[in-house]
Structure formats: structure tokens, C-alpha cells
Image (cartoon, rainbow, N blue to C red):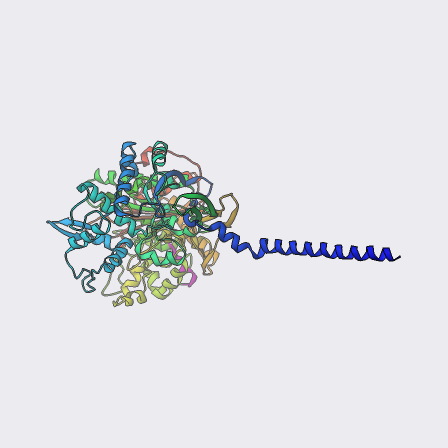
Amino acid sequence: MKRKREHFFRYVVLGAFYVAVCLLFTARLINIQIAGQDYYQEAYNDGYYYRNVTIKAQRGEIFDRNGKALVTNSYTYDLYLDAGSIPKDNDEMNQFILHILRLAEDFGEYEDSFTVPDMPFMQKDGEWTLDQSFMQSAYGKRLTRLLTDLHFTPDSDDGGWEKEDKGEMRETLLYRYGIVGEDMEAKYSQEDSDLLFALRLDMELSYFSTAEPYTILEDIGKKYIAAVTEGTVRGIGIICEAERVYNYPGYASHILGRTGKIMAENAQYYTDKGYKLNAIVGTSGAESAFEDYLHGEDGVLTIVEDEFENVVDTFVSKEPKAGQDVYLTIDIDLQMDAEKALESNIQMIVANAEADDKELTGEDANAGALVAIEKNSGAVLAIASYPTYDLSTFNENYQALREDENAPLFNRALEGTYAPGSTFKPGVAVAALQEDIITPYTEIYGAGKYTYYADFQPSCWRAGCHGNINVSTAIQVSCNYFFYDIGRQLTISNITKYCEKYGLGQPTGIELTEKVGILASPAAREANGETWYDGDTIQAAIGQSDNLFNPLQISSYIATLLNGGTRYSAHLLYEVREYDGRTVYTAEPKIASTISLDSQNVSTVKYAMKGVMEASDGSAVRVFANYPIAVGGKTGTAQVSKTSSDNALFVAFAPFDDPEIVVSCVIEHGAKGTDAGFAIRDVFDSYFGLNEDDDDDEGGKDDGTTNNDDENNN
């Protein structure tokens, strides 16, 4: 019994010792793995340096409503300078840059892949000056800060500098970059000095740093990449970049827009959104309007270097997120046909006018616009502006485009504003019916000259008179006298009330830049310090006076009438999809405003607009006679000046019974409203798949069926 107790005591001691040892090892393990983590991490990191480089996100692509690719990305290889490993000594850096460029020249890459940056200093009459256009850019503002840091004092009075010797500024910068010595003696040839100066200054103004690499060569070939990386392992990097590709060059240019560097006036906006100043953003069109979808999120590449600045590791610490793909409401096939039709229509007008002995019959027609929208949604199907340009060659042709007197860069469809002429009359007719000024059967004697006012007595476009006519006939023959009288009775207050609801003089809702124009009214006139007279009301009633609208507004206004007073916001965005194809946004029709219009009143005007196209005395019968689809529309002619042809306007919808599409066309100096209808007819052909090819109407003389469109709404 005693022996058993002794054994038990030994077991207890051994067990306690075992447990104590286990606890000791466990505590040590915990210390090593958890508490001691920082020590070992520090020991591991000792002598290693980490820096981050931006990985640019792939920009989203742009498609039409049917999924046809409009703007895509083409991938190229660019060579960039890496601030973290490039030689720090000026002489070594300059020689390094020259080596890279000379090697590019040896491999035939220099001319196509390298662009000399813009320079702010110019020599004129032997003196150095500052290029003011450069100084107005974002880089100009950065140069101002740099020169201020170098003790050159800006003169706030005239935007110049206290030290007027621009040569001194230039020499200071040349010395700063080691291009000249202390005695201002050049270290390089004049050609190399100029090249290095342009690059080194551009690098500094681009905020070249470890976080901001500097791209020096773009779209380089694989042979050059192999050569430059074989002999140069530090100071450079190769990155895959995306370049915009326009799959329908020359078409939809005003819609799609361009990308480029952030402009000075937008710098604060983009930096507040987290963009870097050297980021590429949309600068116009859909590229700008849908920037938030297209841009994506940049990633981060982490570079690990040892104490000797050797790269020992690289890894992606933040994956870039590709931008989303944007689908537009336009149909690219319809868009192309619309642009071709508009150009052809203008050429037809000029050819016919030149064959005519009379002056101011359209021989000066040189520009125009056309807009097609869905009646029931406000979705834009086509936006054509002529003359146009090619996005794929924009950079090469920029100066010529900018200096072209016909302004091809100007989007006339959205930013051009025009007096609507007689296309305004259907809206006035509906308002007069709504306010019981007239009924569908009321007849007014169109006497020719309107003599209600003693001091202002305008005449109808027709030399004689239209006799007793009702509202339907007045629209068909575009009688000014009829609309003078109902406009006077309706009053400018009611005209303004209805037309505002139609969307005239109001933003359409389109995501692109537009000019809203003016809806004629006493308030608008008085805002300019001028007086409104009674005679202005009757002029406004026929689409003259101060009325100025863009073509999209005209399409939207007619769609609003057809919708019984419901106006939809015009829109270009159809869908947004992720890179993997998932749809994240689909546009729904948005109501911009409403006004309750009696269906009978709308029907009266609608049938009158059908008569414009079909009746023997309709002002557009020679364009749409025997057209296979019933359509409605209205012509318009608006005086521009006594020394140029009038503007020609036309708006139409189809099919008549259940309208789907509304199209408006304006041709500057087109002379006759009817003649703007040929482009619309071609658009209808395309939309409905008719594919008619009538040579007589494509540049030939008018067929002479009727000529009731020559209303002159002076």
C-alpha cells in the first residue's frame, strides 16, 4: 500500500512537469507567431523599399442600341520612364533619355511613337516670349507656379512677369535640368538641347514621380522592346495601353466625342473625384457625358527594391477595375443613312439653285442638321450635323477643322438654334383649339395683308389671298394670315404657356451639350432691356420674332403634340453593362412635362399635317406624294437676312396611324422648307426598310408637282 502511494506521488510530479513544459512551449509559440510578428516582419523588411505605380483601368467601350461596336479599344505597348529607378543625376538622366530615343530611331520607332511636347517659350524677332495659348492650359498654370518658385514674380495687372526677359526664365530652366553648365555653355547639340528641354519641362509639369510614370514612347514594336529592355533594366517600364478605335470613321462624330487630358477649367472637378491630373477623360460627346461609367478604377502595382535599388519583386496590390460599356439609343445604320441623306439633300439644293437664274434660291446652302427620335420615349435614334469630321483623323486635321469657315466641329443638331418658321404653326393651332379661340370648322378669310394694326401690317407669303379657310387648310397651305389672326386672339401669354409645355425654349434632357434657345415672350425681350410690341405676337405665332430652337427641340415638340401633351426627356443612354456583360442600368422613359390636350384637337392638327404631305395643295406633296407609308409633317421657311437664302425646315412623323418616329431637318440657306424633306424621306426609307432609290429626287430638278412651300415668314 505504501509502495502504491509512492508511485502515485511520482506520477503526479512527472505529470506536473510535463504540463509545465507544454505550457512553456505553447507560450513561446504564441510569442513567436503573434506577439513577435512585428519583430520578424521588420527583420524581413529590413533593407527593402516599396513603391506604387498606377495601373490604368481599361476604358469602357461604346455600342449602339443593337450591340454594334462604335468605339472600342486597341491595345498597344508604351514605354515609360520610372522615377524610382531612373538616374537621379541630371547628366546621367539626360544621356539616358537620349539613349532611349536614339535606339528608337535605330529601330524605326522614333517618328511614329515619339511626339515632342508643346513648348511655352517661342522666339520672335530675336526675343523669347511665352505662348499665351500654352499658358492658358493646365500645364500653363503649373509652369506659373514653377516660375514663381524660381523667384520670377507674376504681374497680376497684365498677366505678364515682373522680369520681362523670358530668355532668363528659359536659361534658368535649362540650368535646372543640366542642359547647360554654370557658365550657360551648352552641353549638347542645339537639336538635343531643344529636345531635352521640351521633355524635361514636360516631365516636371506632368508631376513625374514614383507614383506618376512618364510615357515617352507610344505604340512601340516588340523588336524595340526586346532591344531596349535587354540593355536597360532600370529607369524604364513597358505598359500595355488602350487606344480608342472608331469602327465607323466619319460617322456619329458629334455624338461620340473625344478623349484627352484634363483641361485646366475642369482640373478641380476631376481632382475632387480622385482623378490624377494626367488622367485621360472624355472631353466631348458621349465620352464626356458618360465618363463616370466609362472610366473605371485604376489599380496599383507595388515594386519592391533592395537597398541597392534593384527590383526584387513586383505584385499587383490593387487590381484595376475596367470601365463599364455604354450602349447608346442610336441605330448606327440609321445614323449613317441620316448623315448621307443630309449631305445629299444639301448638294441637291445647291445644284438646283445653280441651274436656276434666280438669286437666293439655295445656292449658298452649306450646312444643316437632322434629328430623329422615338415618339413614345424620347430616345434619340439619329443626330446628324453637316459638315462633319472624322474622329479617327481628328488630331492630324485639327487645325484645318478649327479654321474651316463652315465650322464642322459645331454640332448644329444640338447647339445650333434656328427660327422654326411654319413648323411652329401646329403648336399654335392646338393651343387655339384648346382655348376655344377656334373650332375645327372656324373659317377665317385669308386676305393676304393683315391690317389689324395700323403701324404693322405684314403680308402672307402668297401674293394674293387664300380666301375662307379653316385650321386644317391653313396648316396644309401654311397660311400666315390665318395664324396672324389666331395668334393675336390667343395672346402671347397663352402661346408661351403651351409652347413651354411642348418643350420649346426648354432643355430637352439630352445628356450632351445643347443650346436651349429662346421662346419669344415679353419677359425674354425685357430681360434684354427691350420692349415687346403687339406686332411681335403675330410674328411669334408664325415661328418668327425671337423664337430660336435647336432641331432636337423641334422633334421633341411635335412628339409632345402626338402624345397628347406628354413630353418625354430626350436621352442618348440606352444601357450600361459591366465588362462581363451584366446589365447594370437600362434607361426608362422619363416624363419632362405634361399638358392635357384634347384628343380631338390633336387629331384635327394631326390630319392637317397629313394633308401637308398628301393633299394637292399640301406644301410637301412633291416630296411625299404616293409614299408607301402614310406620314404627317410640316414645312417651314425662315428669313435669315436680305443677302442670303432663307433657312429651310421640315418636320415629319410616321407611320401616321401609330407614329413611332419623329424627324426634323434644318438646312441653312436651303431657301424652301419643302426641299429639307428629301433627307427626312430617306431616313424613313432606312427606318422602315423601304430602300427606295429615286434618282430624280437625289440631286435632280424639282418635279414641279406643286410649289406651295414658298412661304416667306418675314
Q: Quadrant of residue 703?
A: top left
- Span colored in magenta: 426-436
Left or right: 6, with 195 as reference point: right
| Residue drawn at (17%, 42%) of the image | 190
Asked if residue 402 lies in the magenta stretch, the reply is no
The one of 37 and 311 positioned closer to us in this rendering: 37
Prevailing SS of the magenta stretch: helix
The one of 545 and 555 positioned closer to us in this rendering: 555
Q: Is 80 situated above or below 552?
A: above
Asked if residue 432 lies in the magenta stretch, the reply is yes
Q: Position of residue 34 (x, y in %)?
A: 58, 55
Tell me, yes or no, if residue 579 can be seen here: yes
Pick the quarter of the image with the C terminus. bottom left
Left or right: 540, with 57 as reference point: left
Q: Position of residue 243 (x, y in %)?
A: 37, 41
Q: Position of residue 397 (x, y in %)?
A: 26, 41
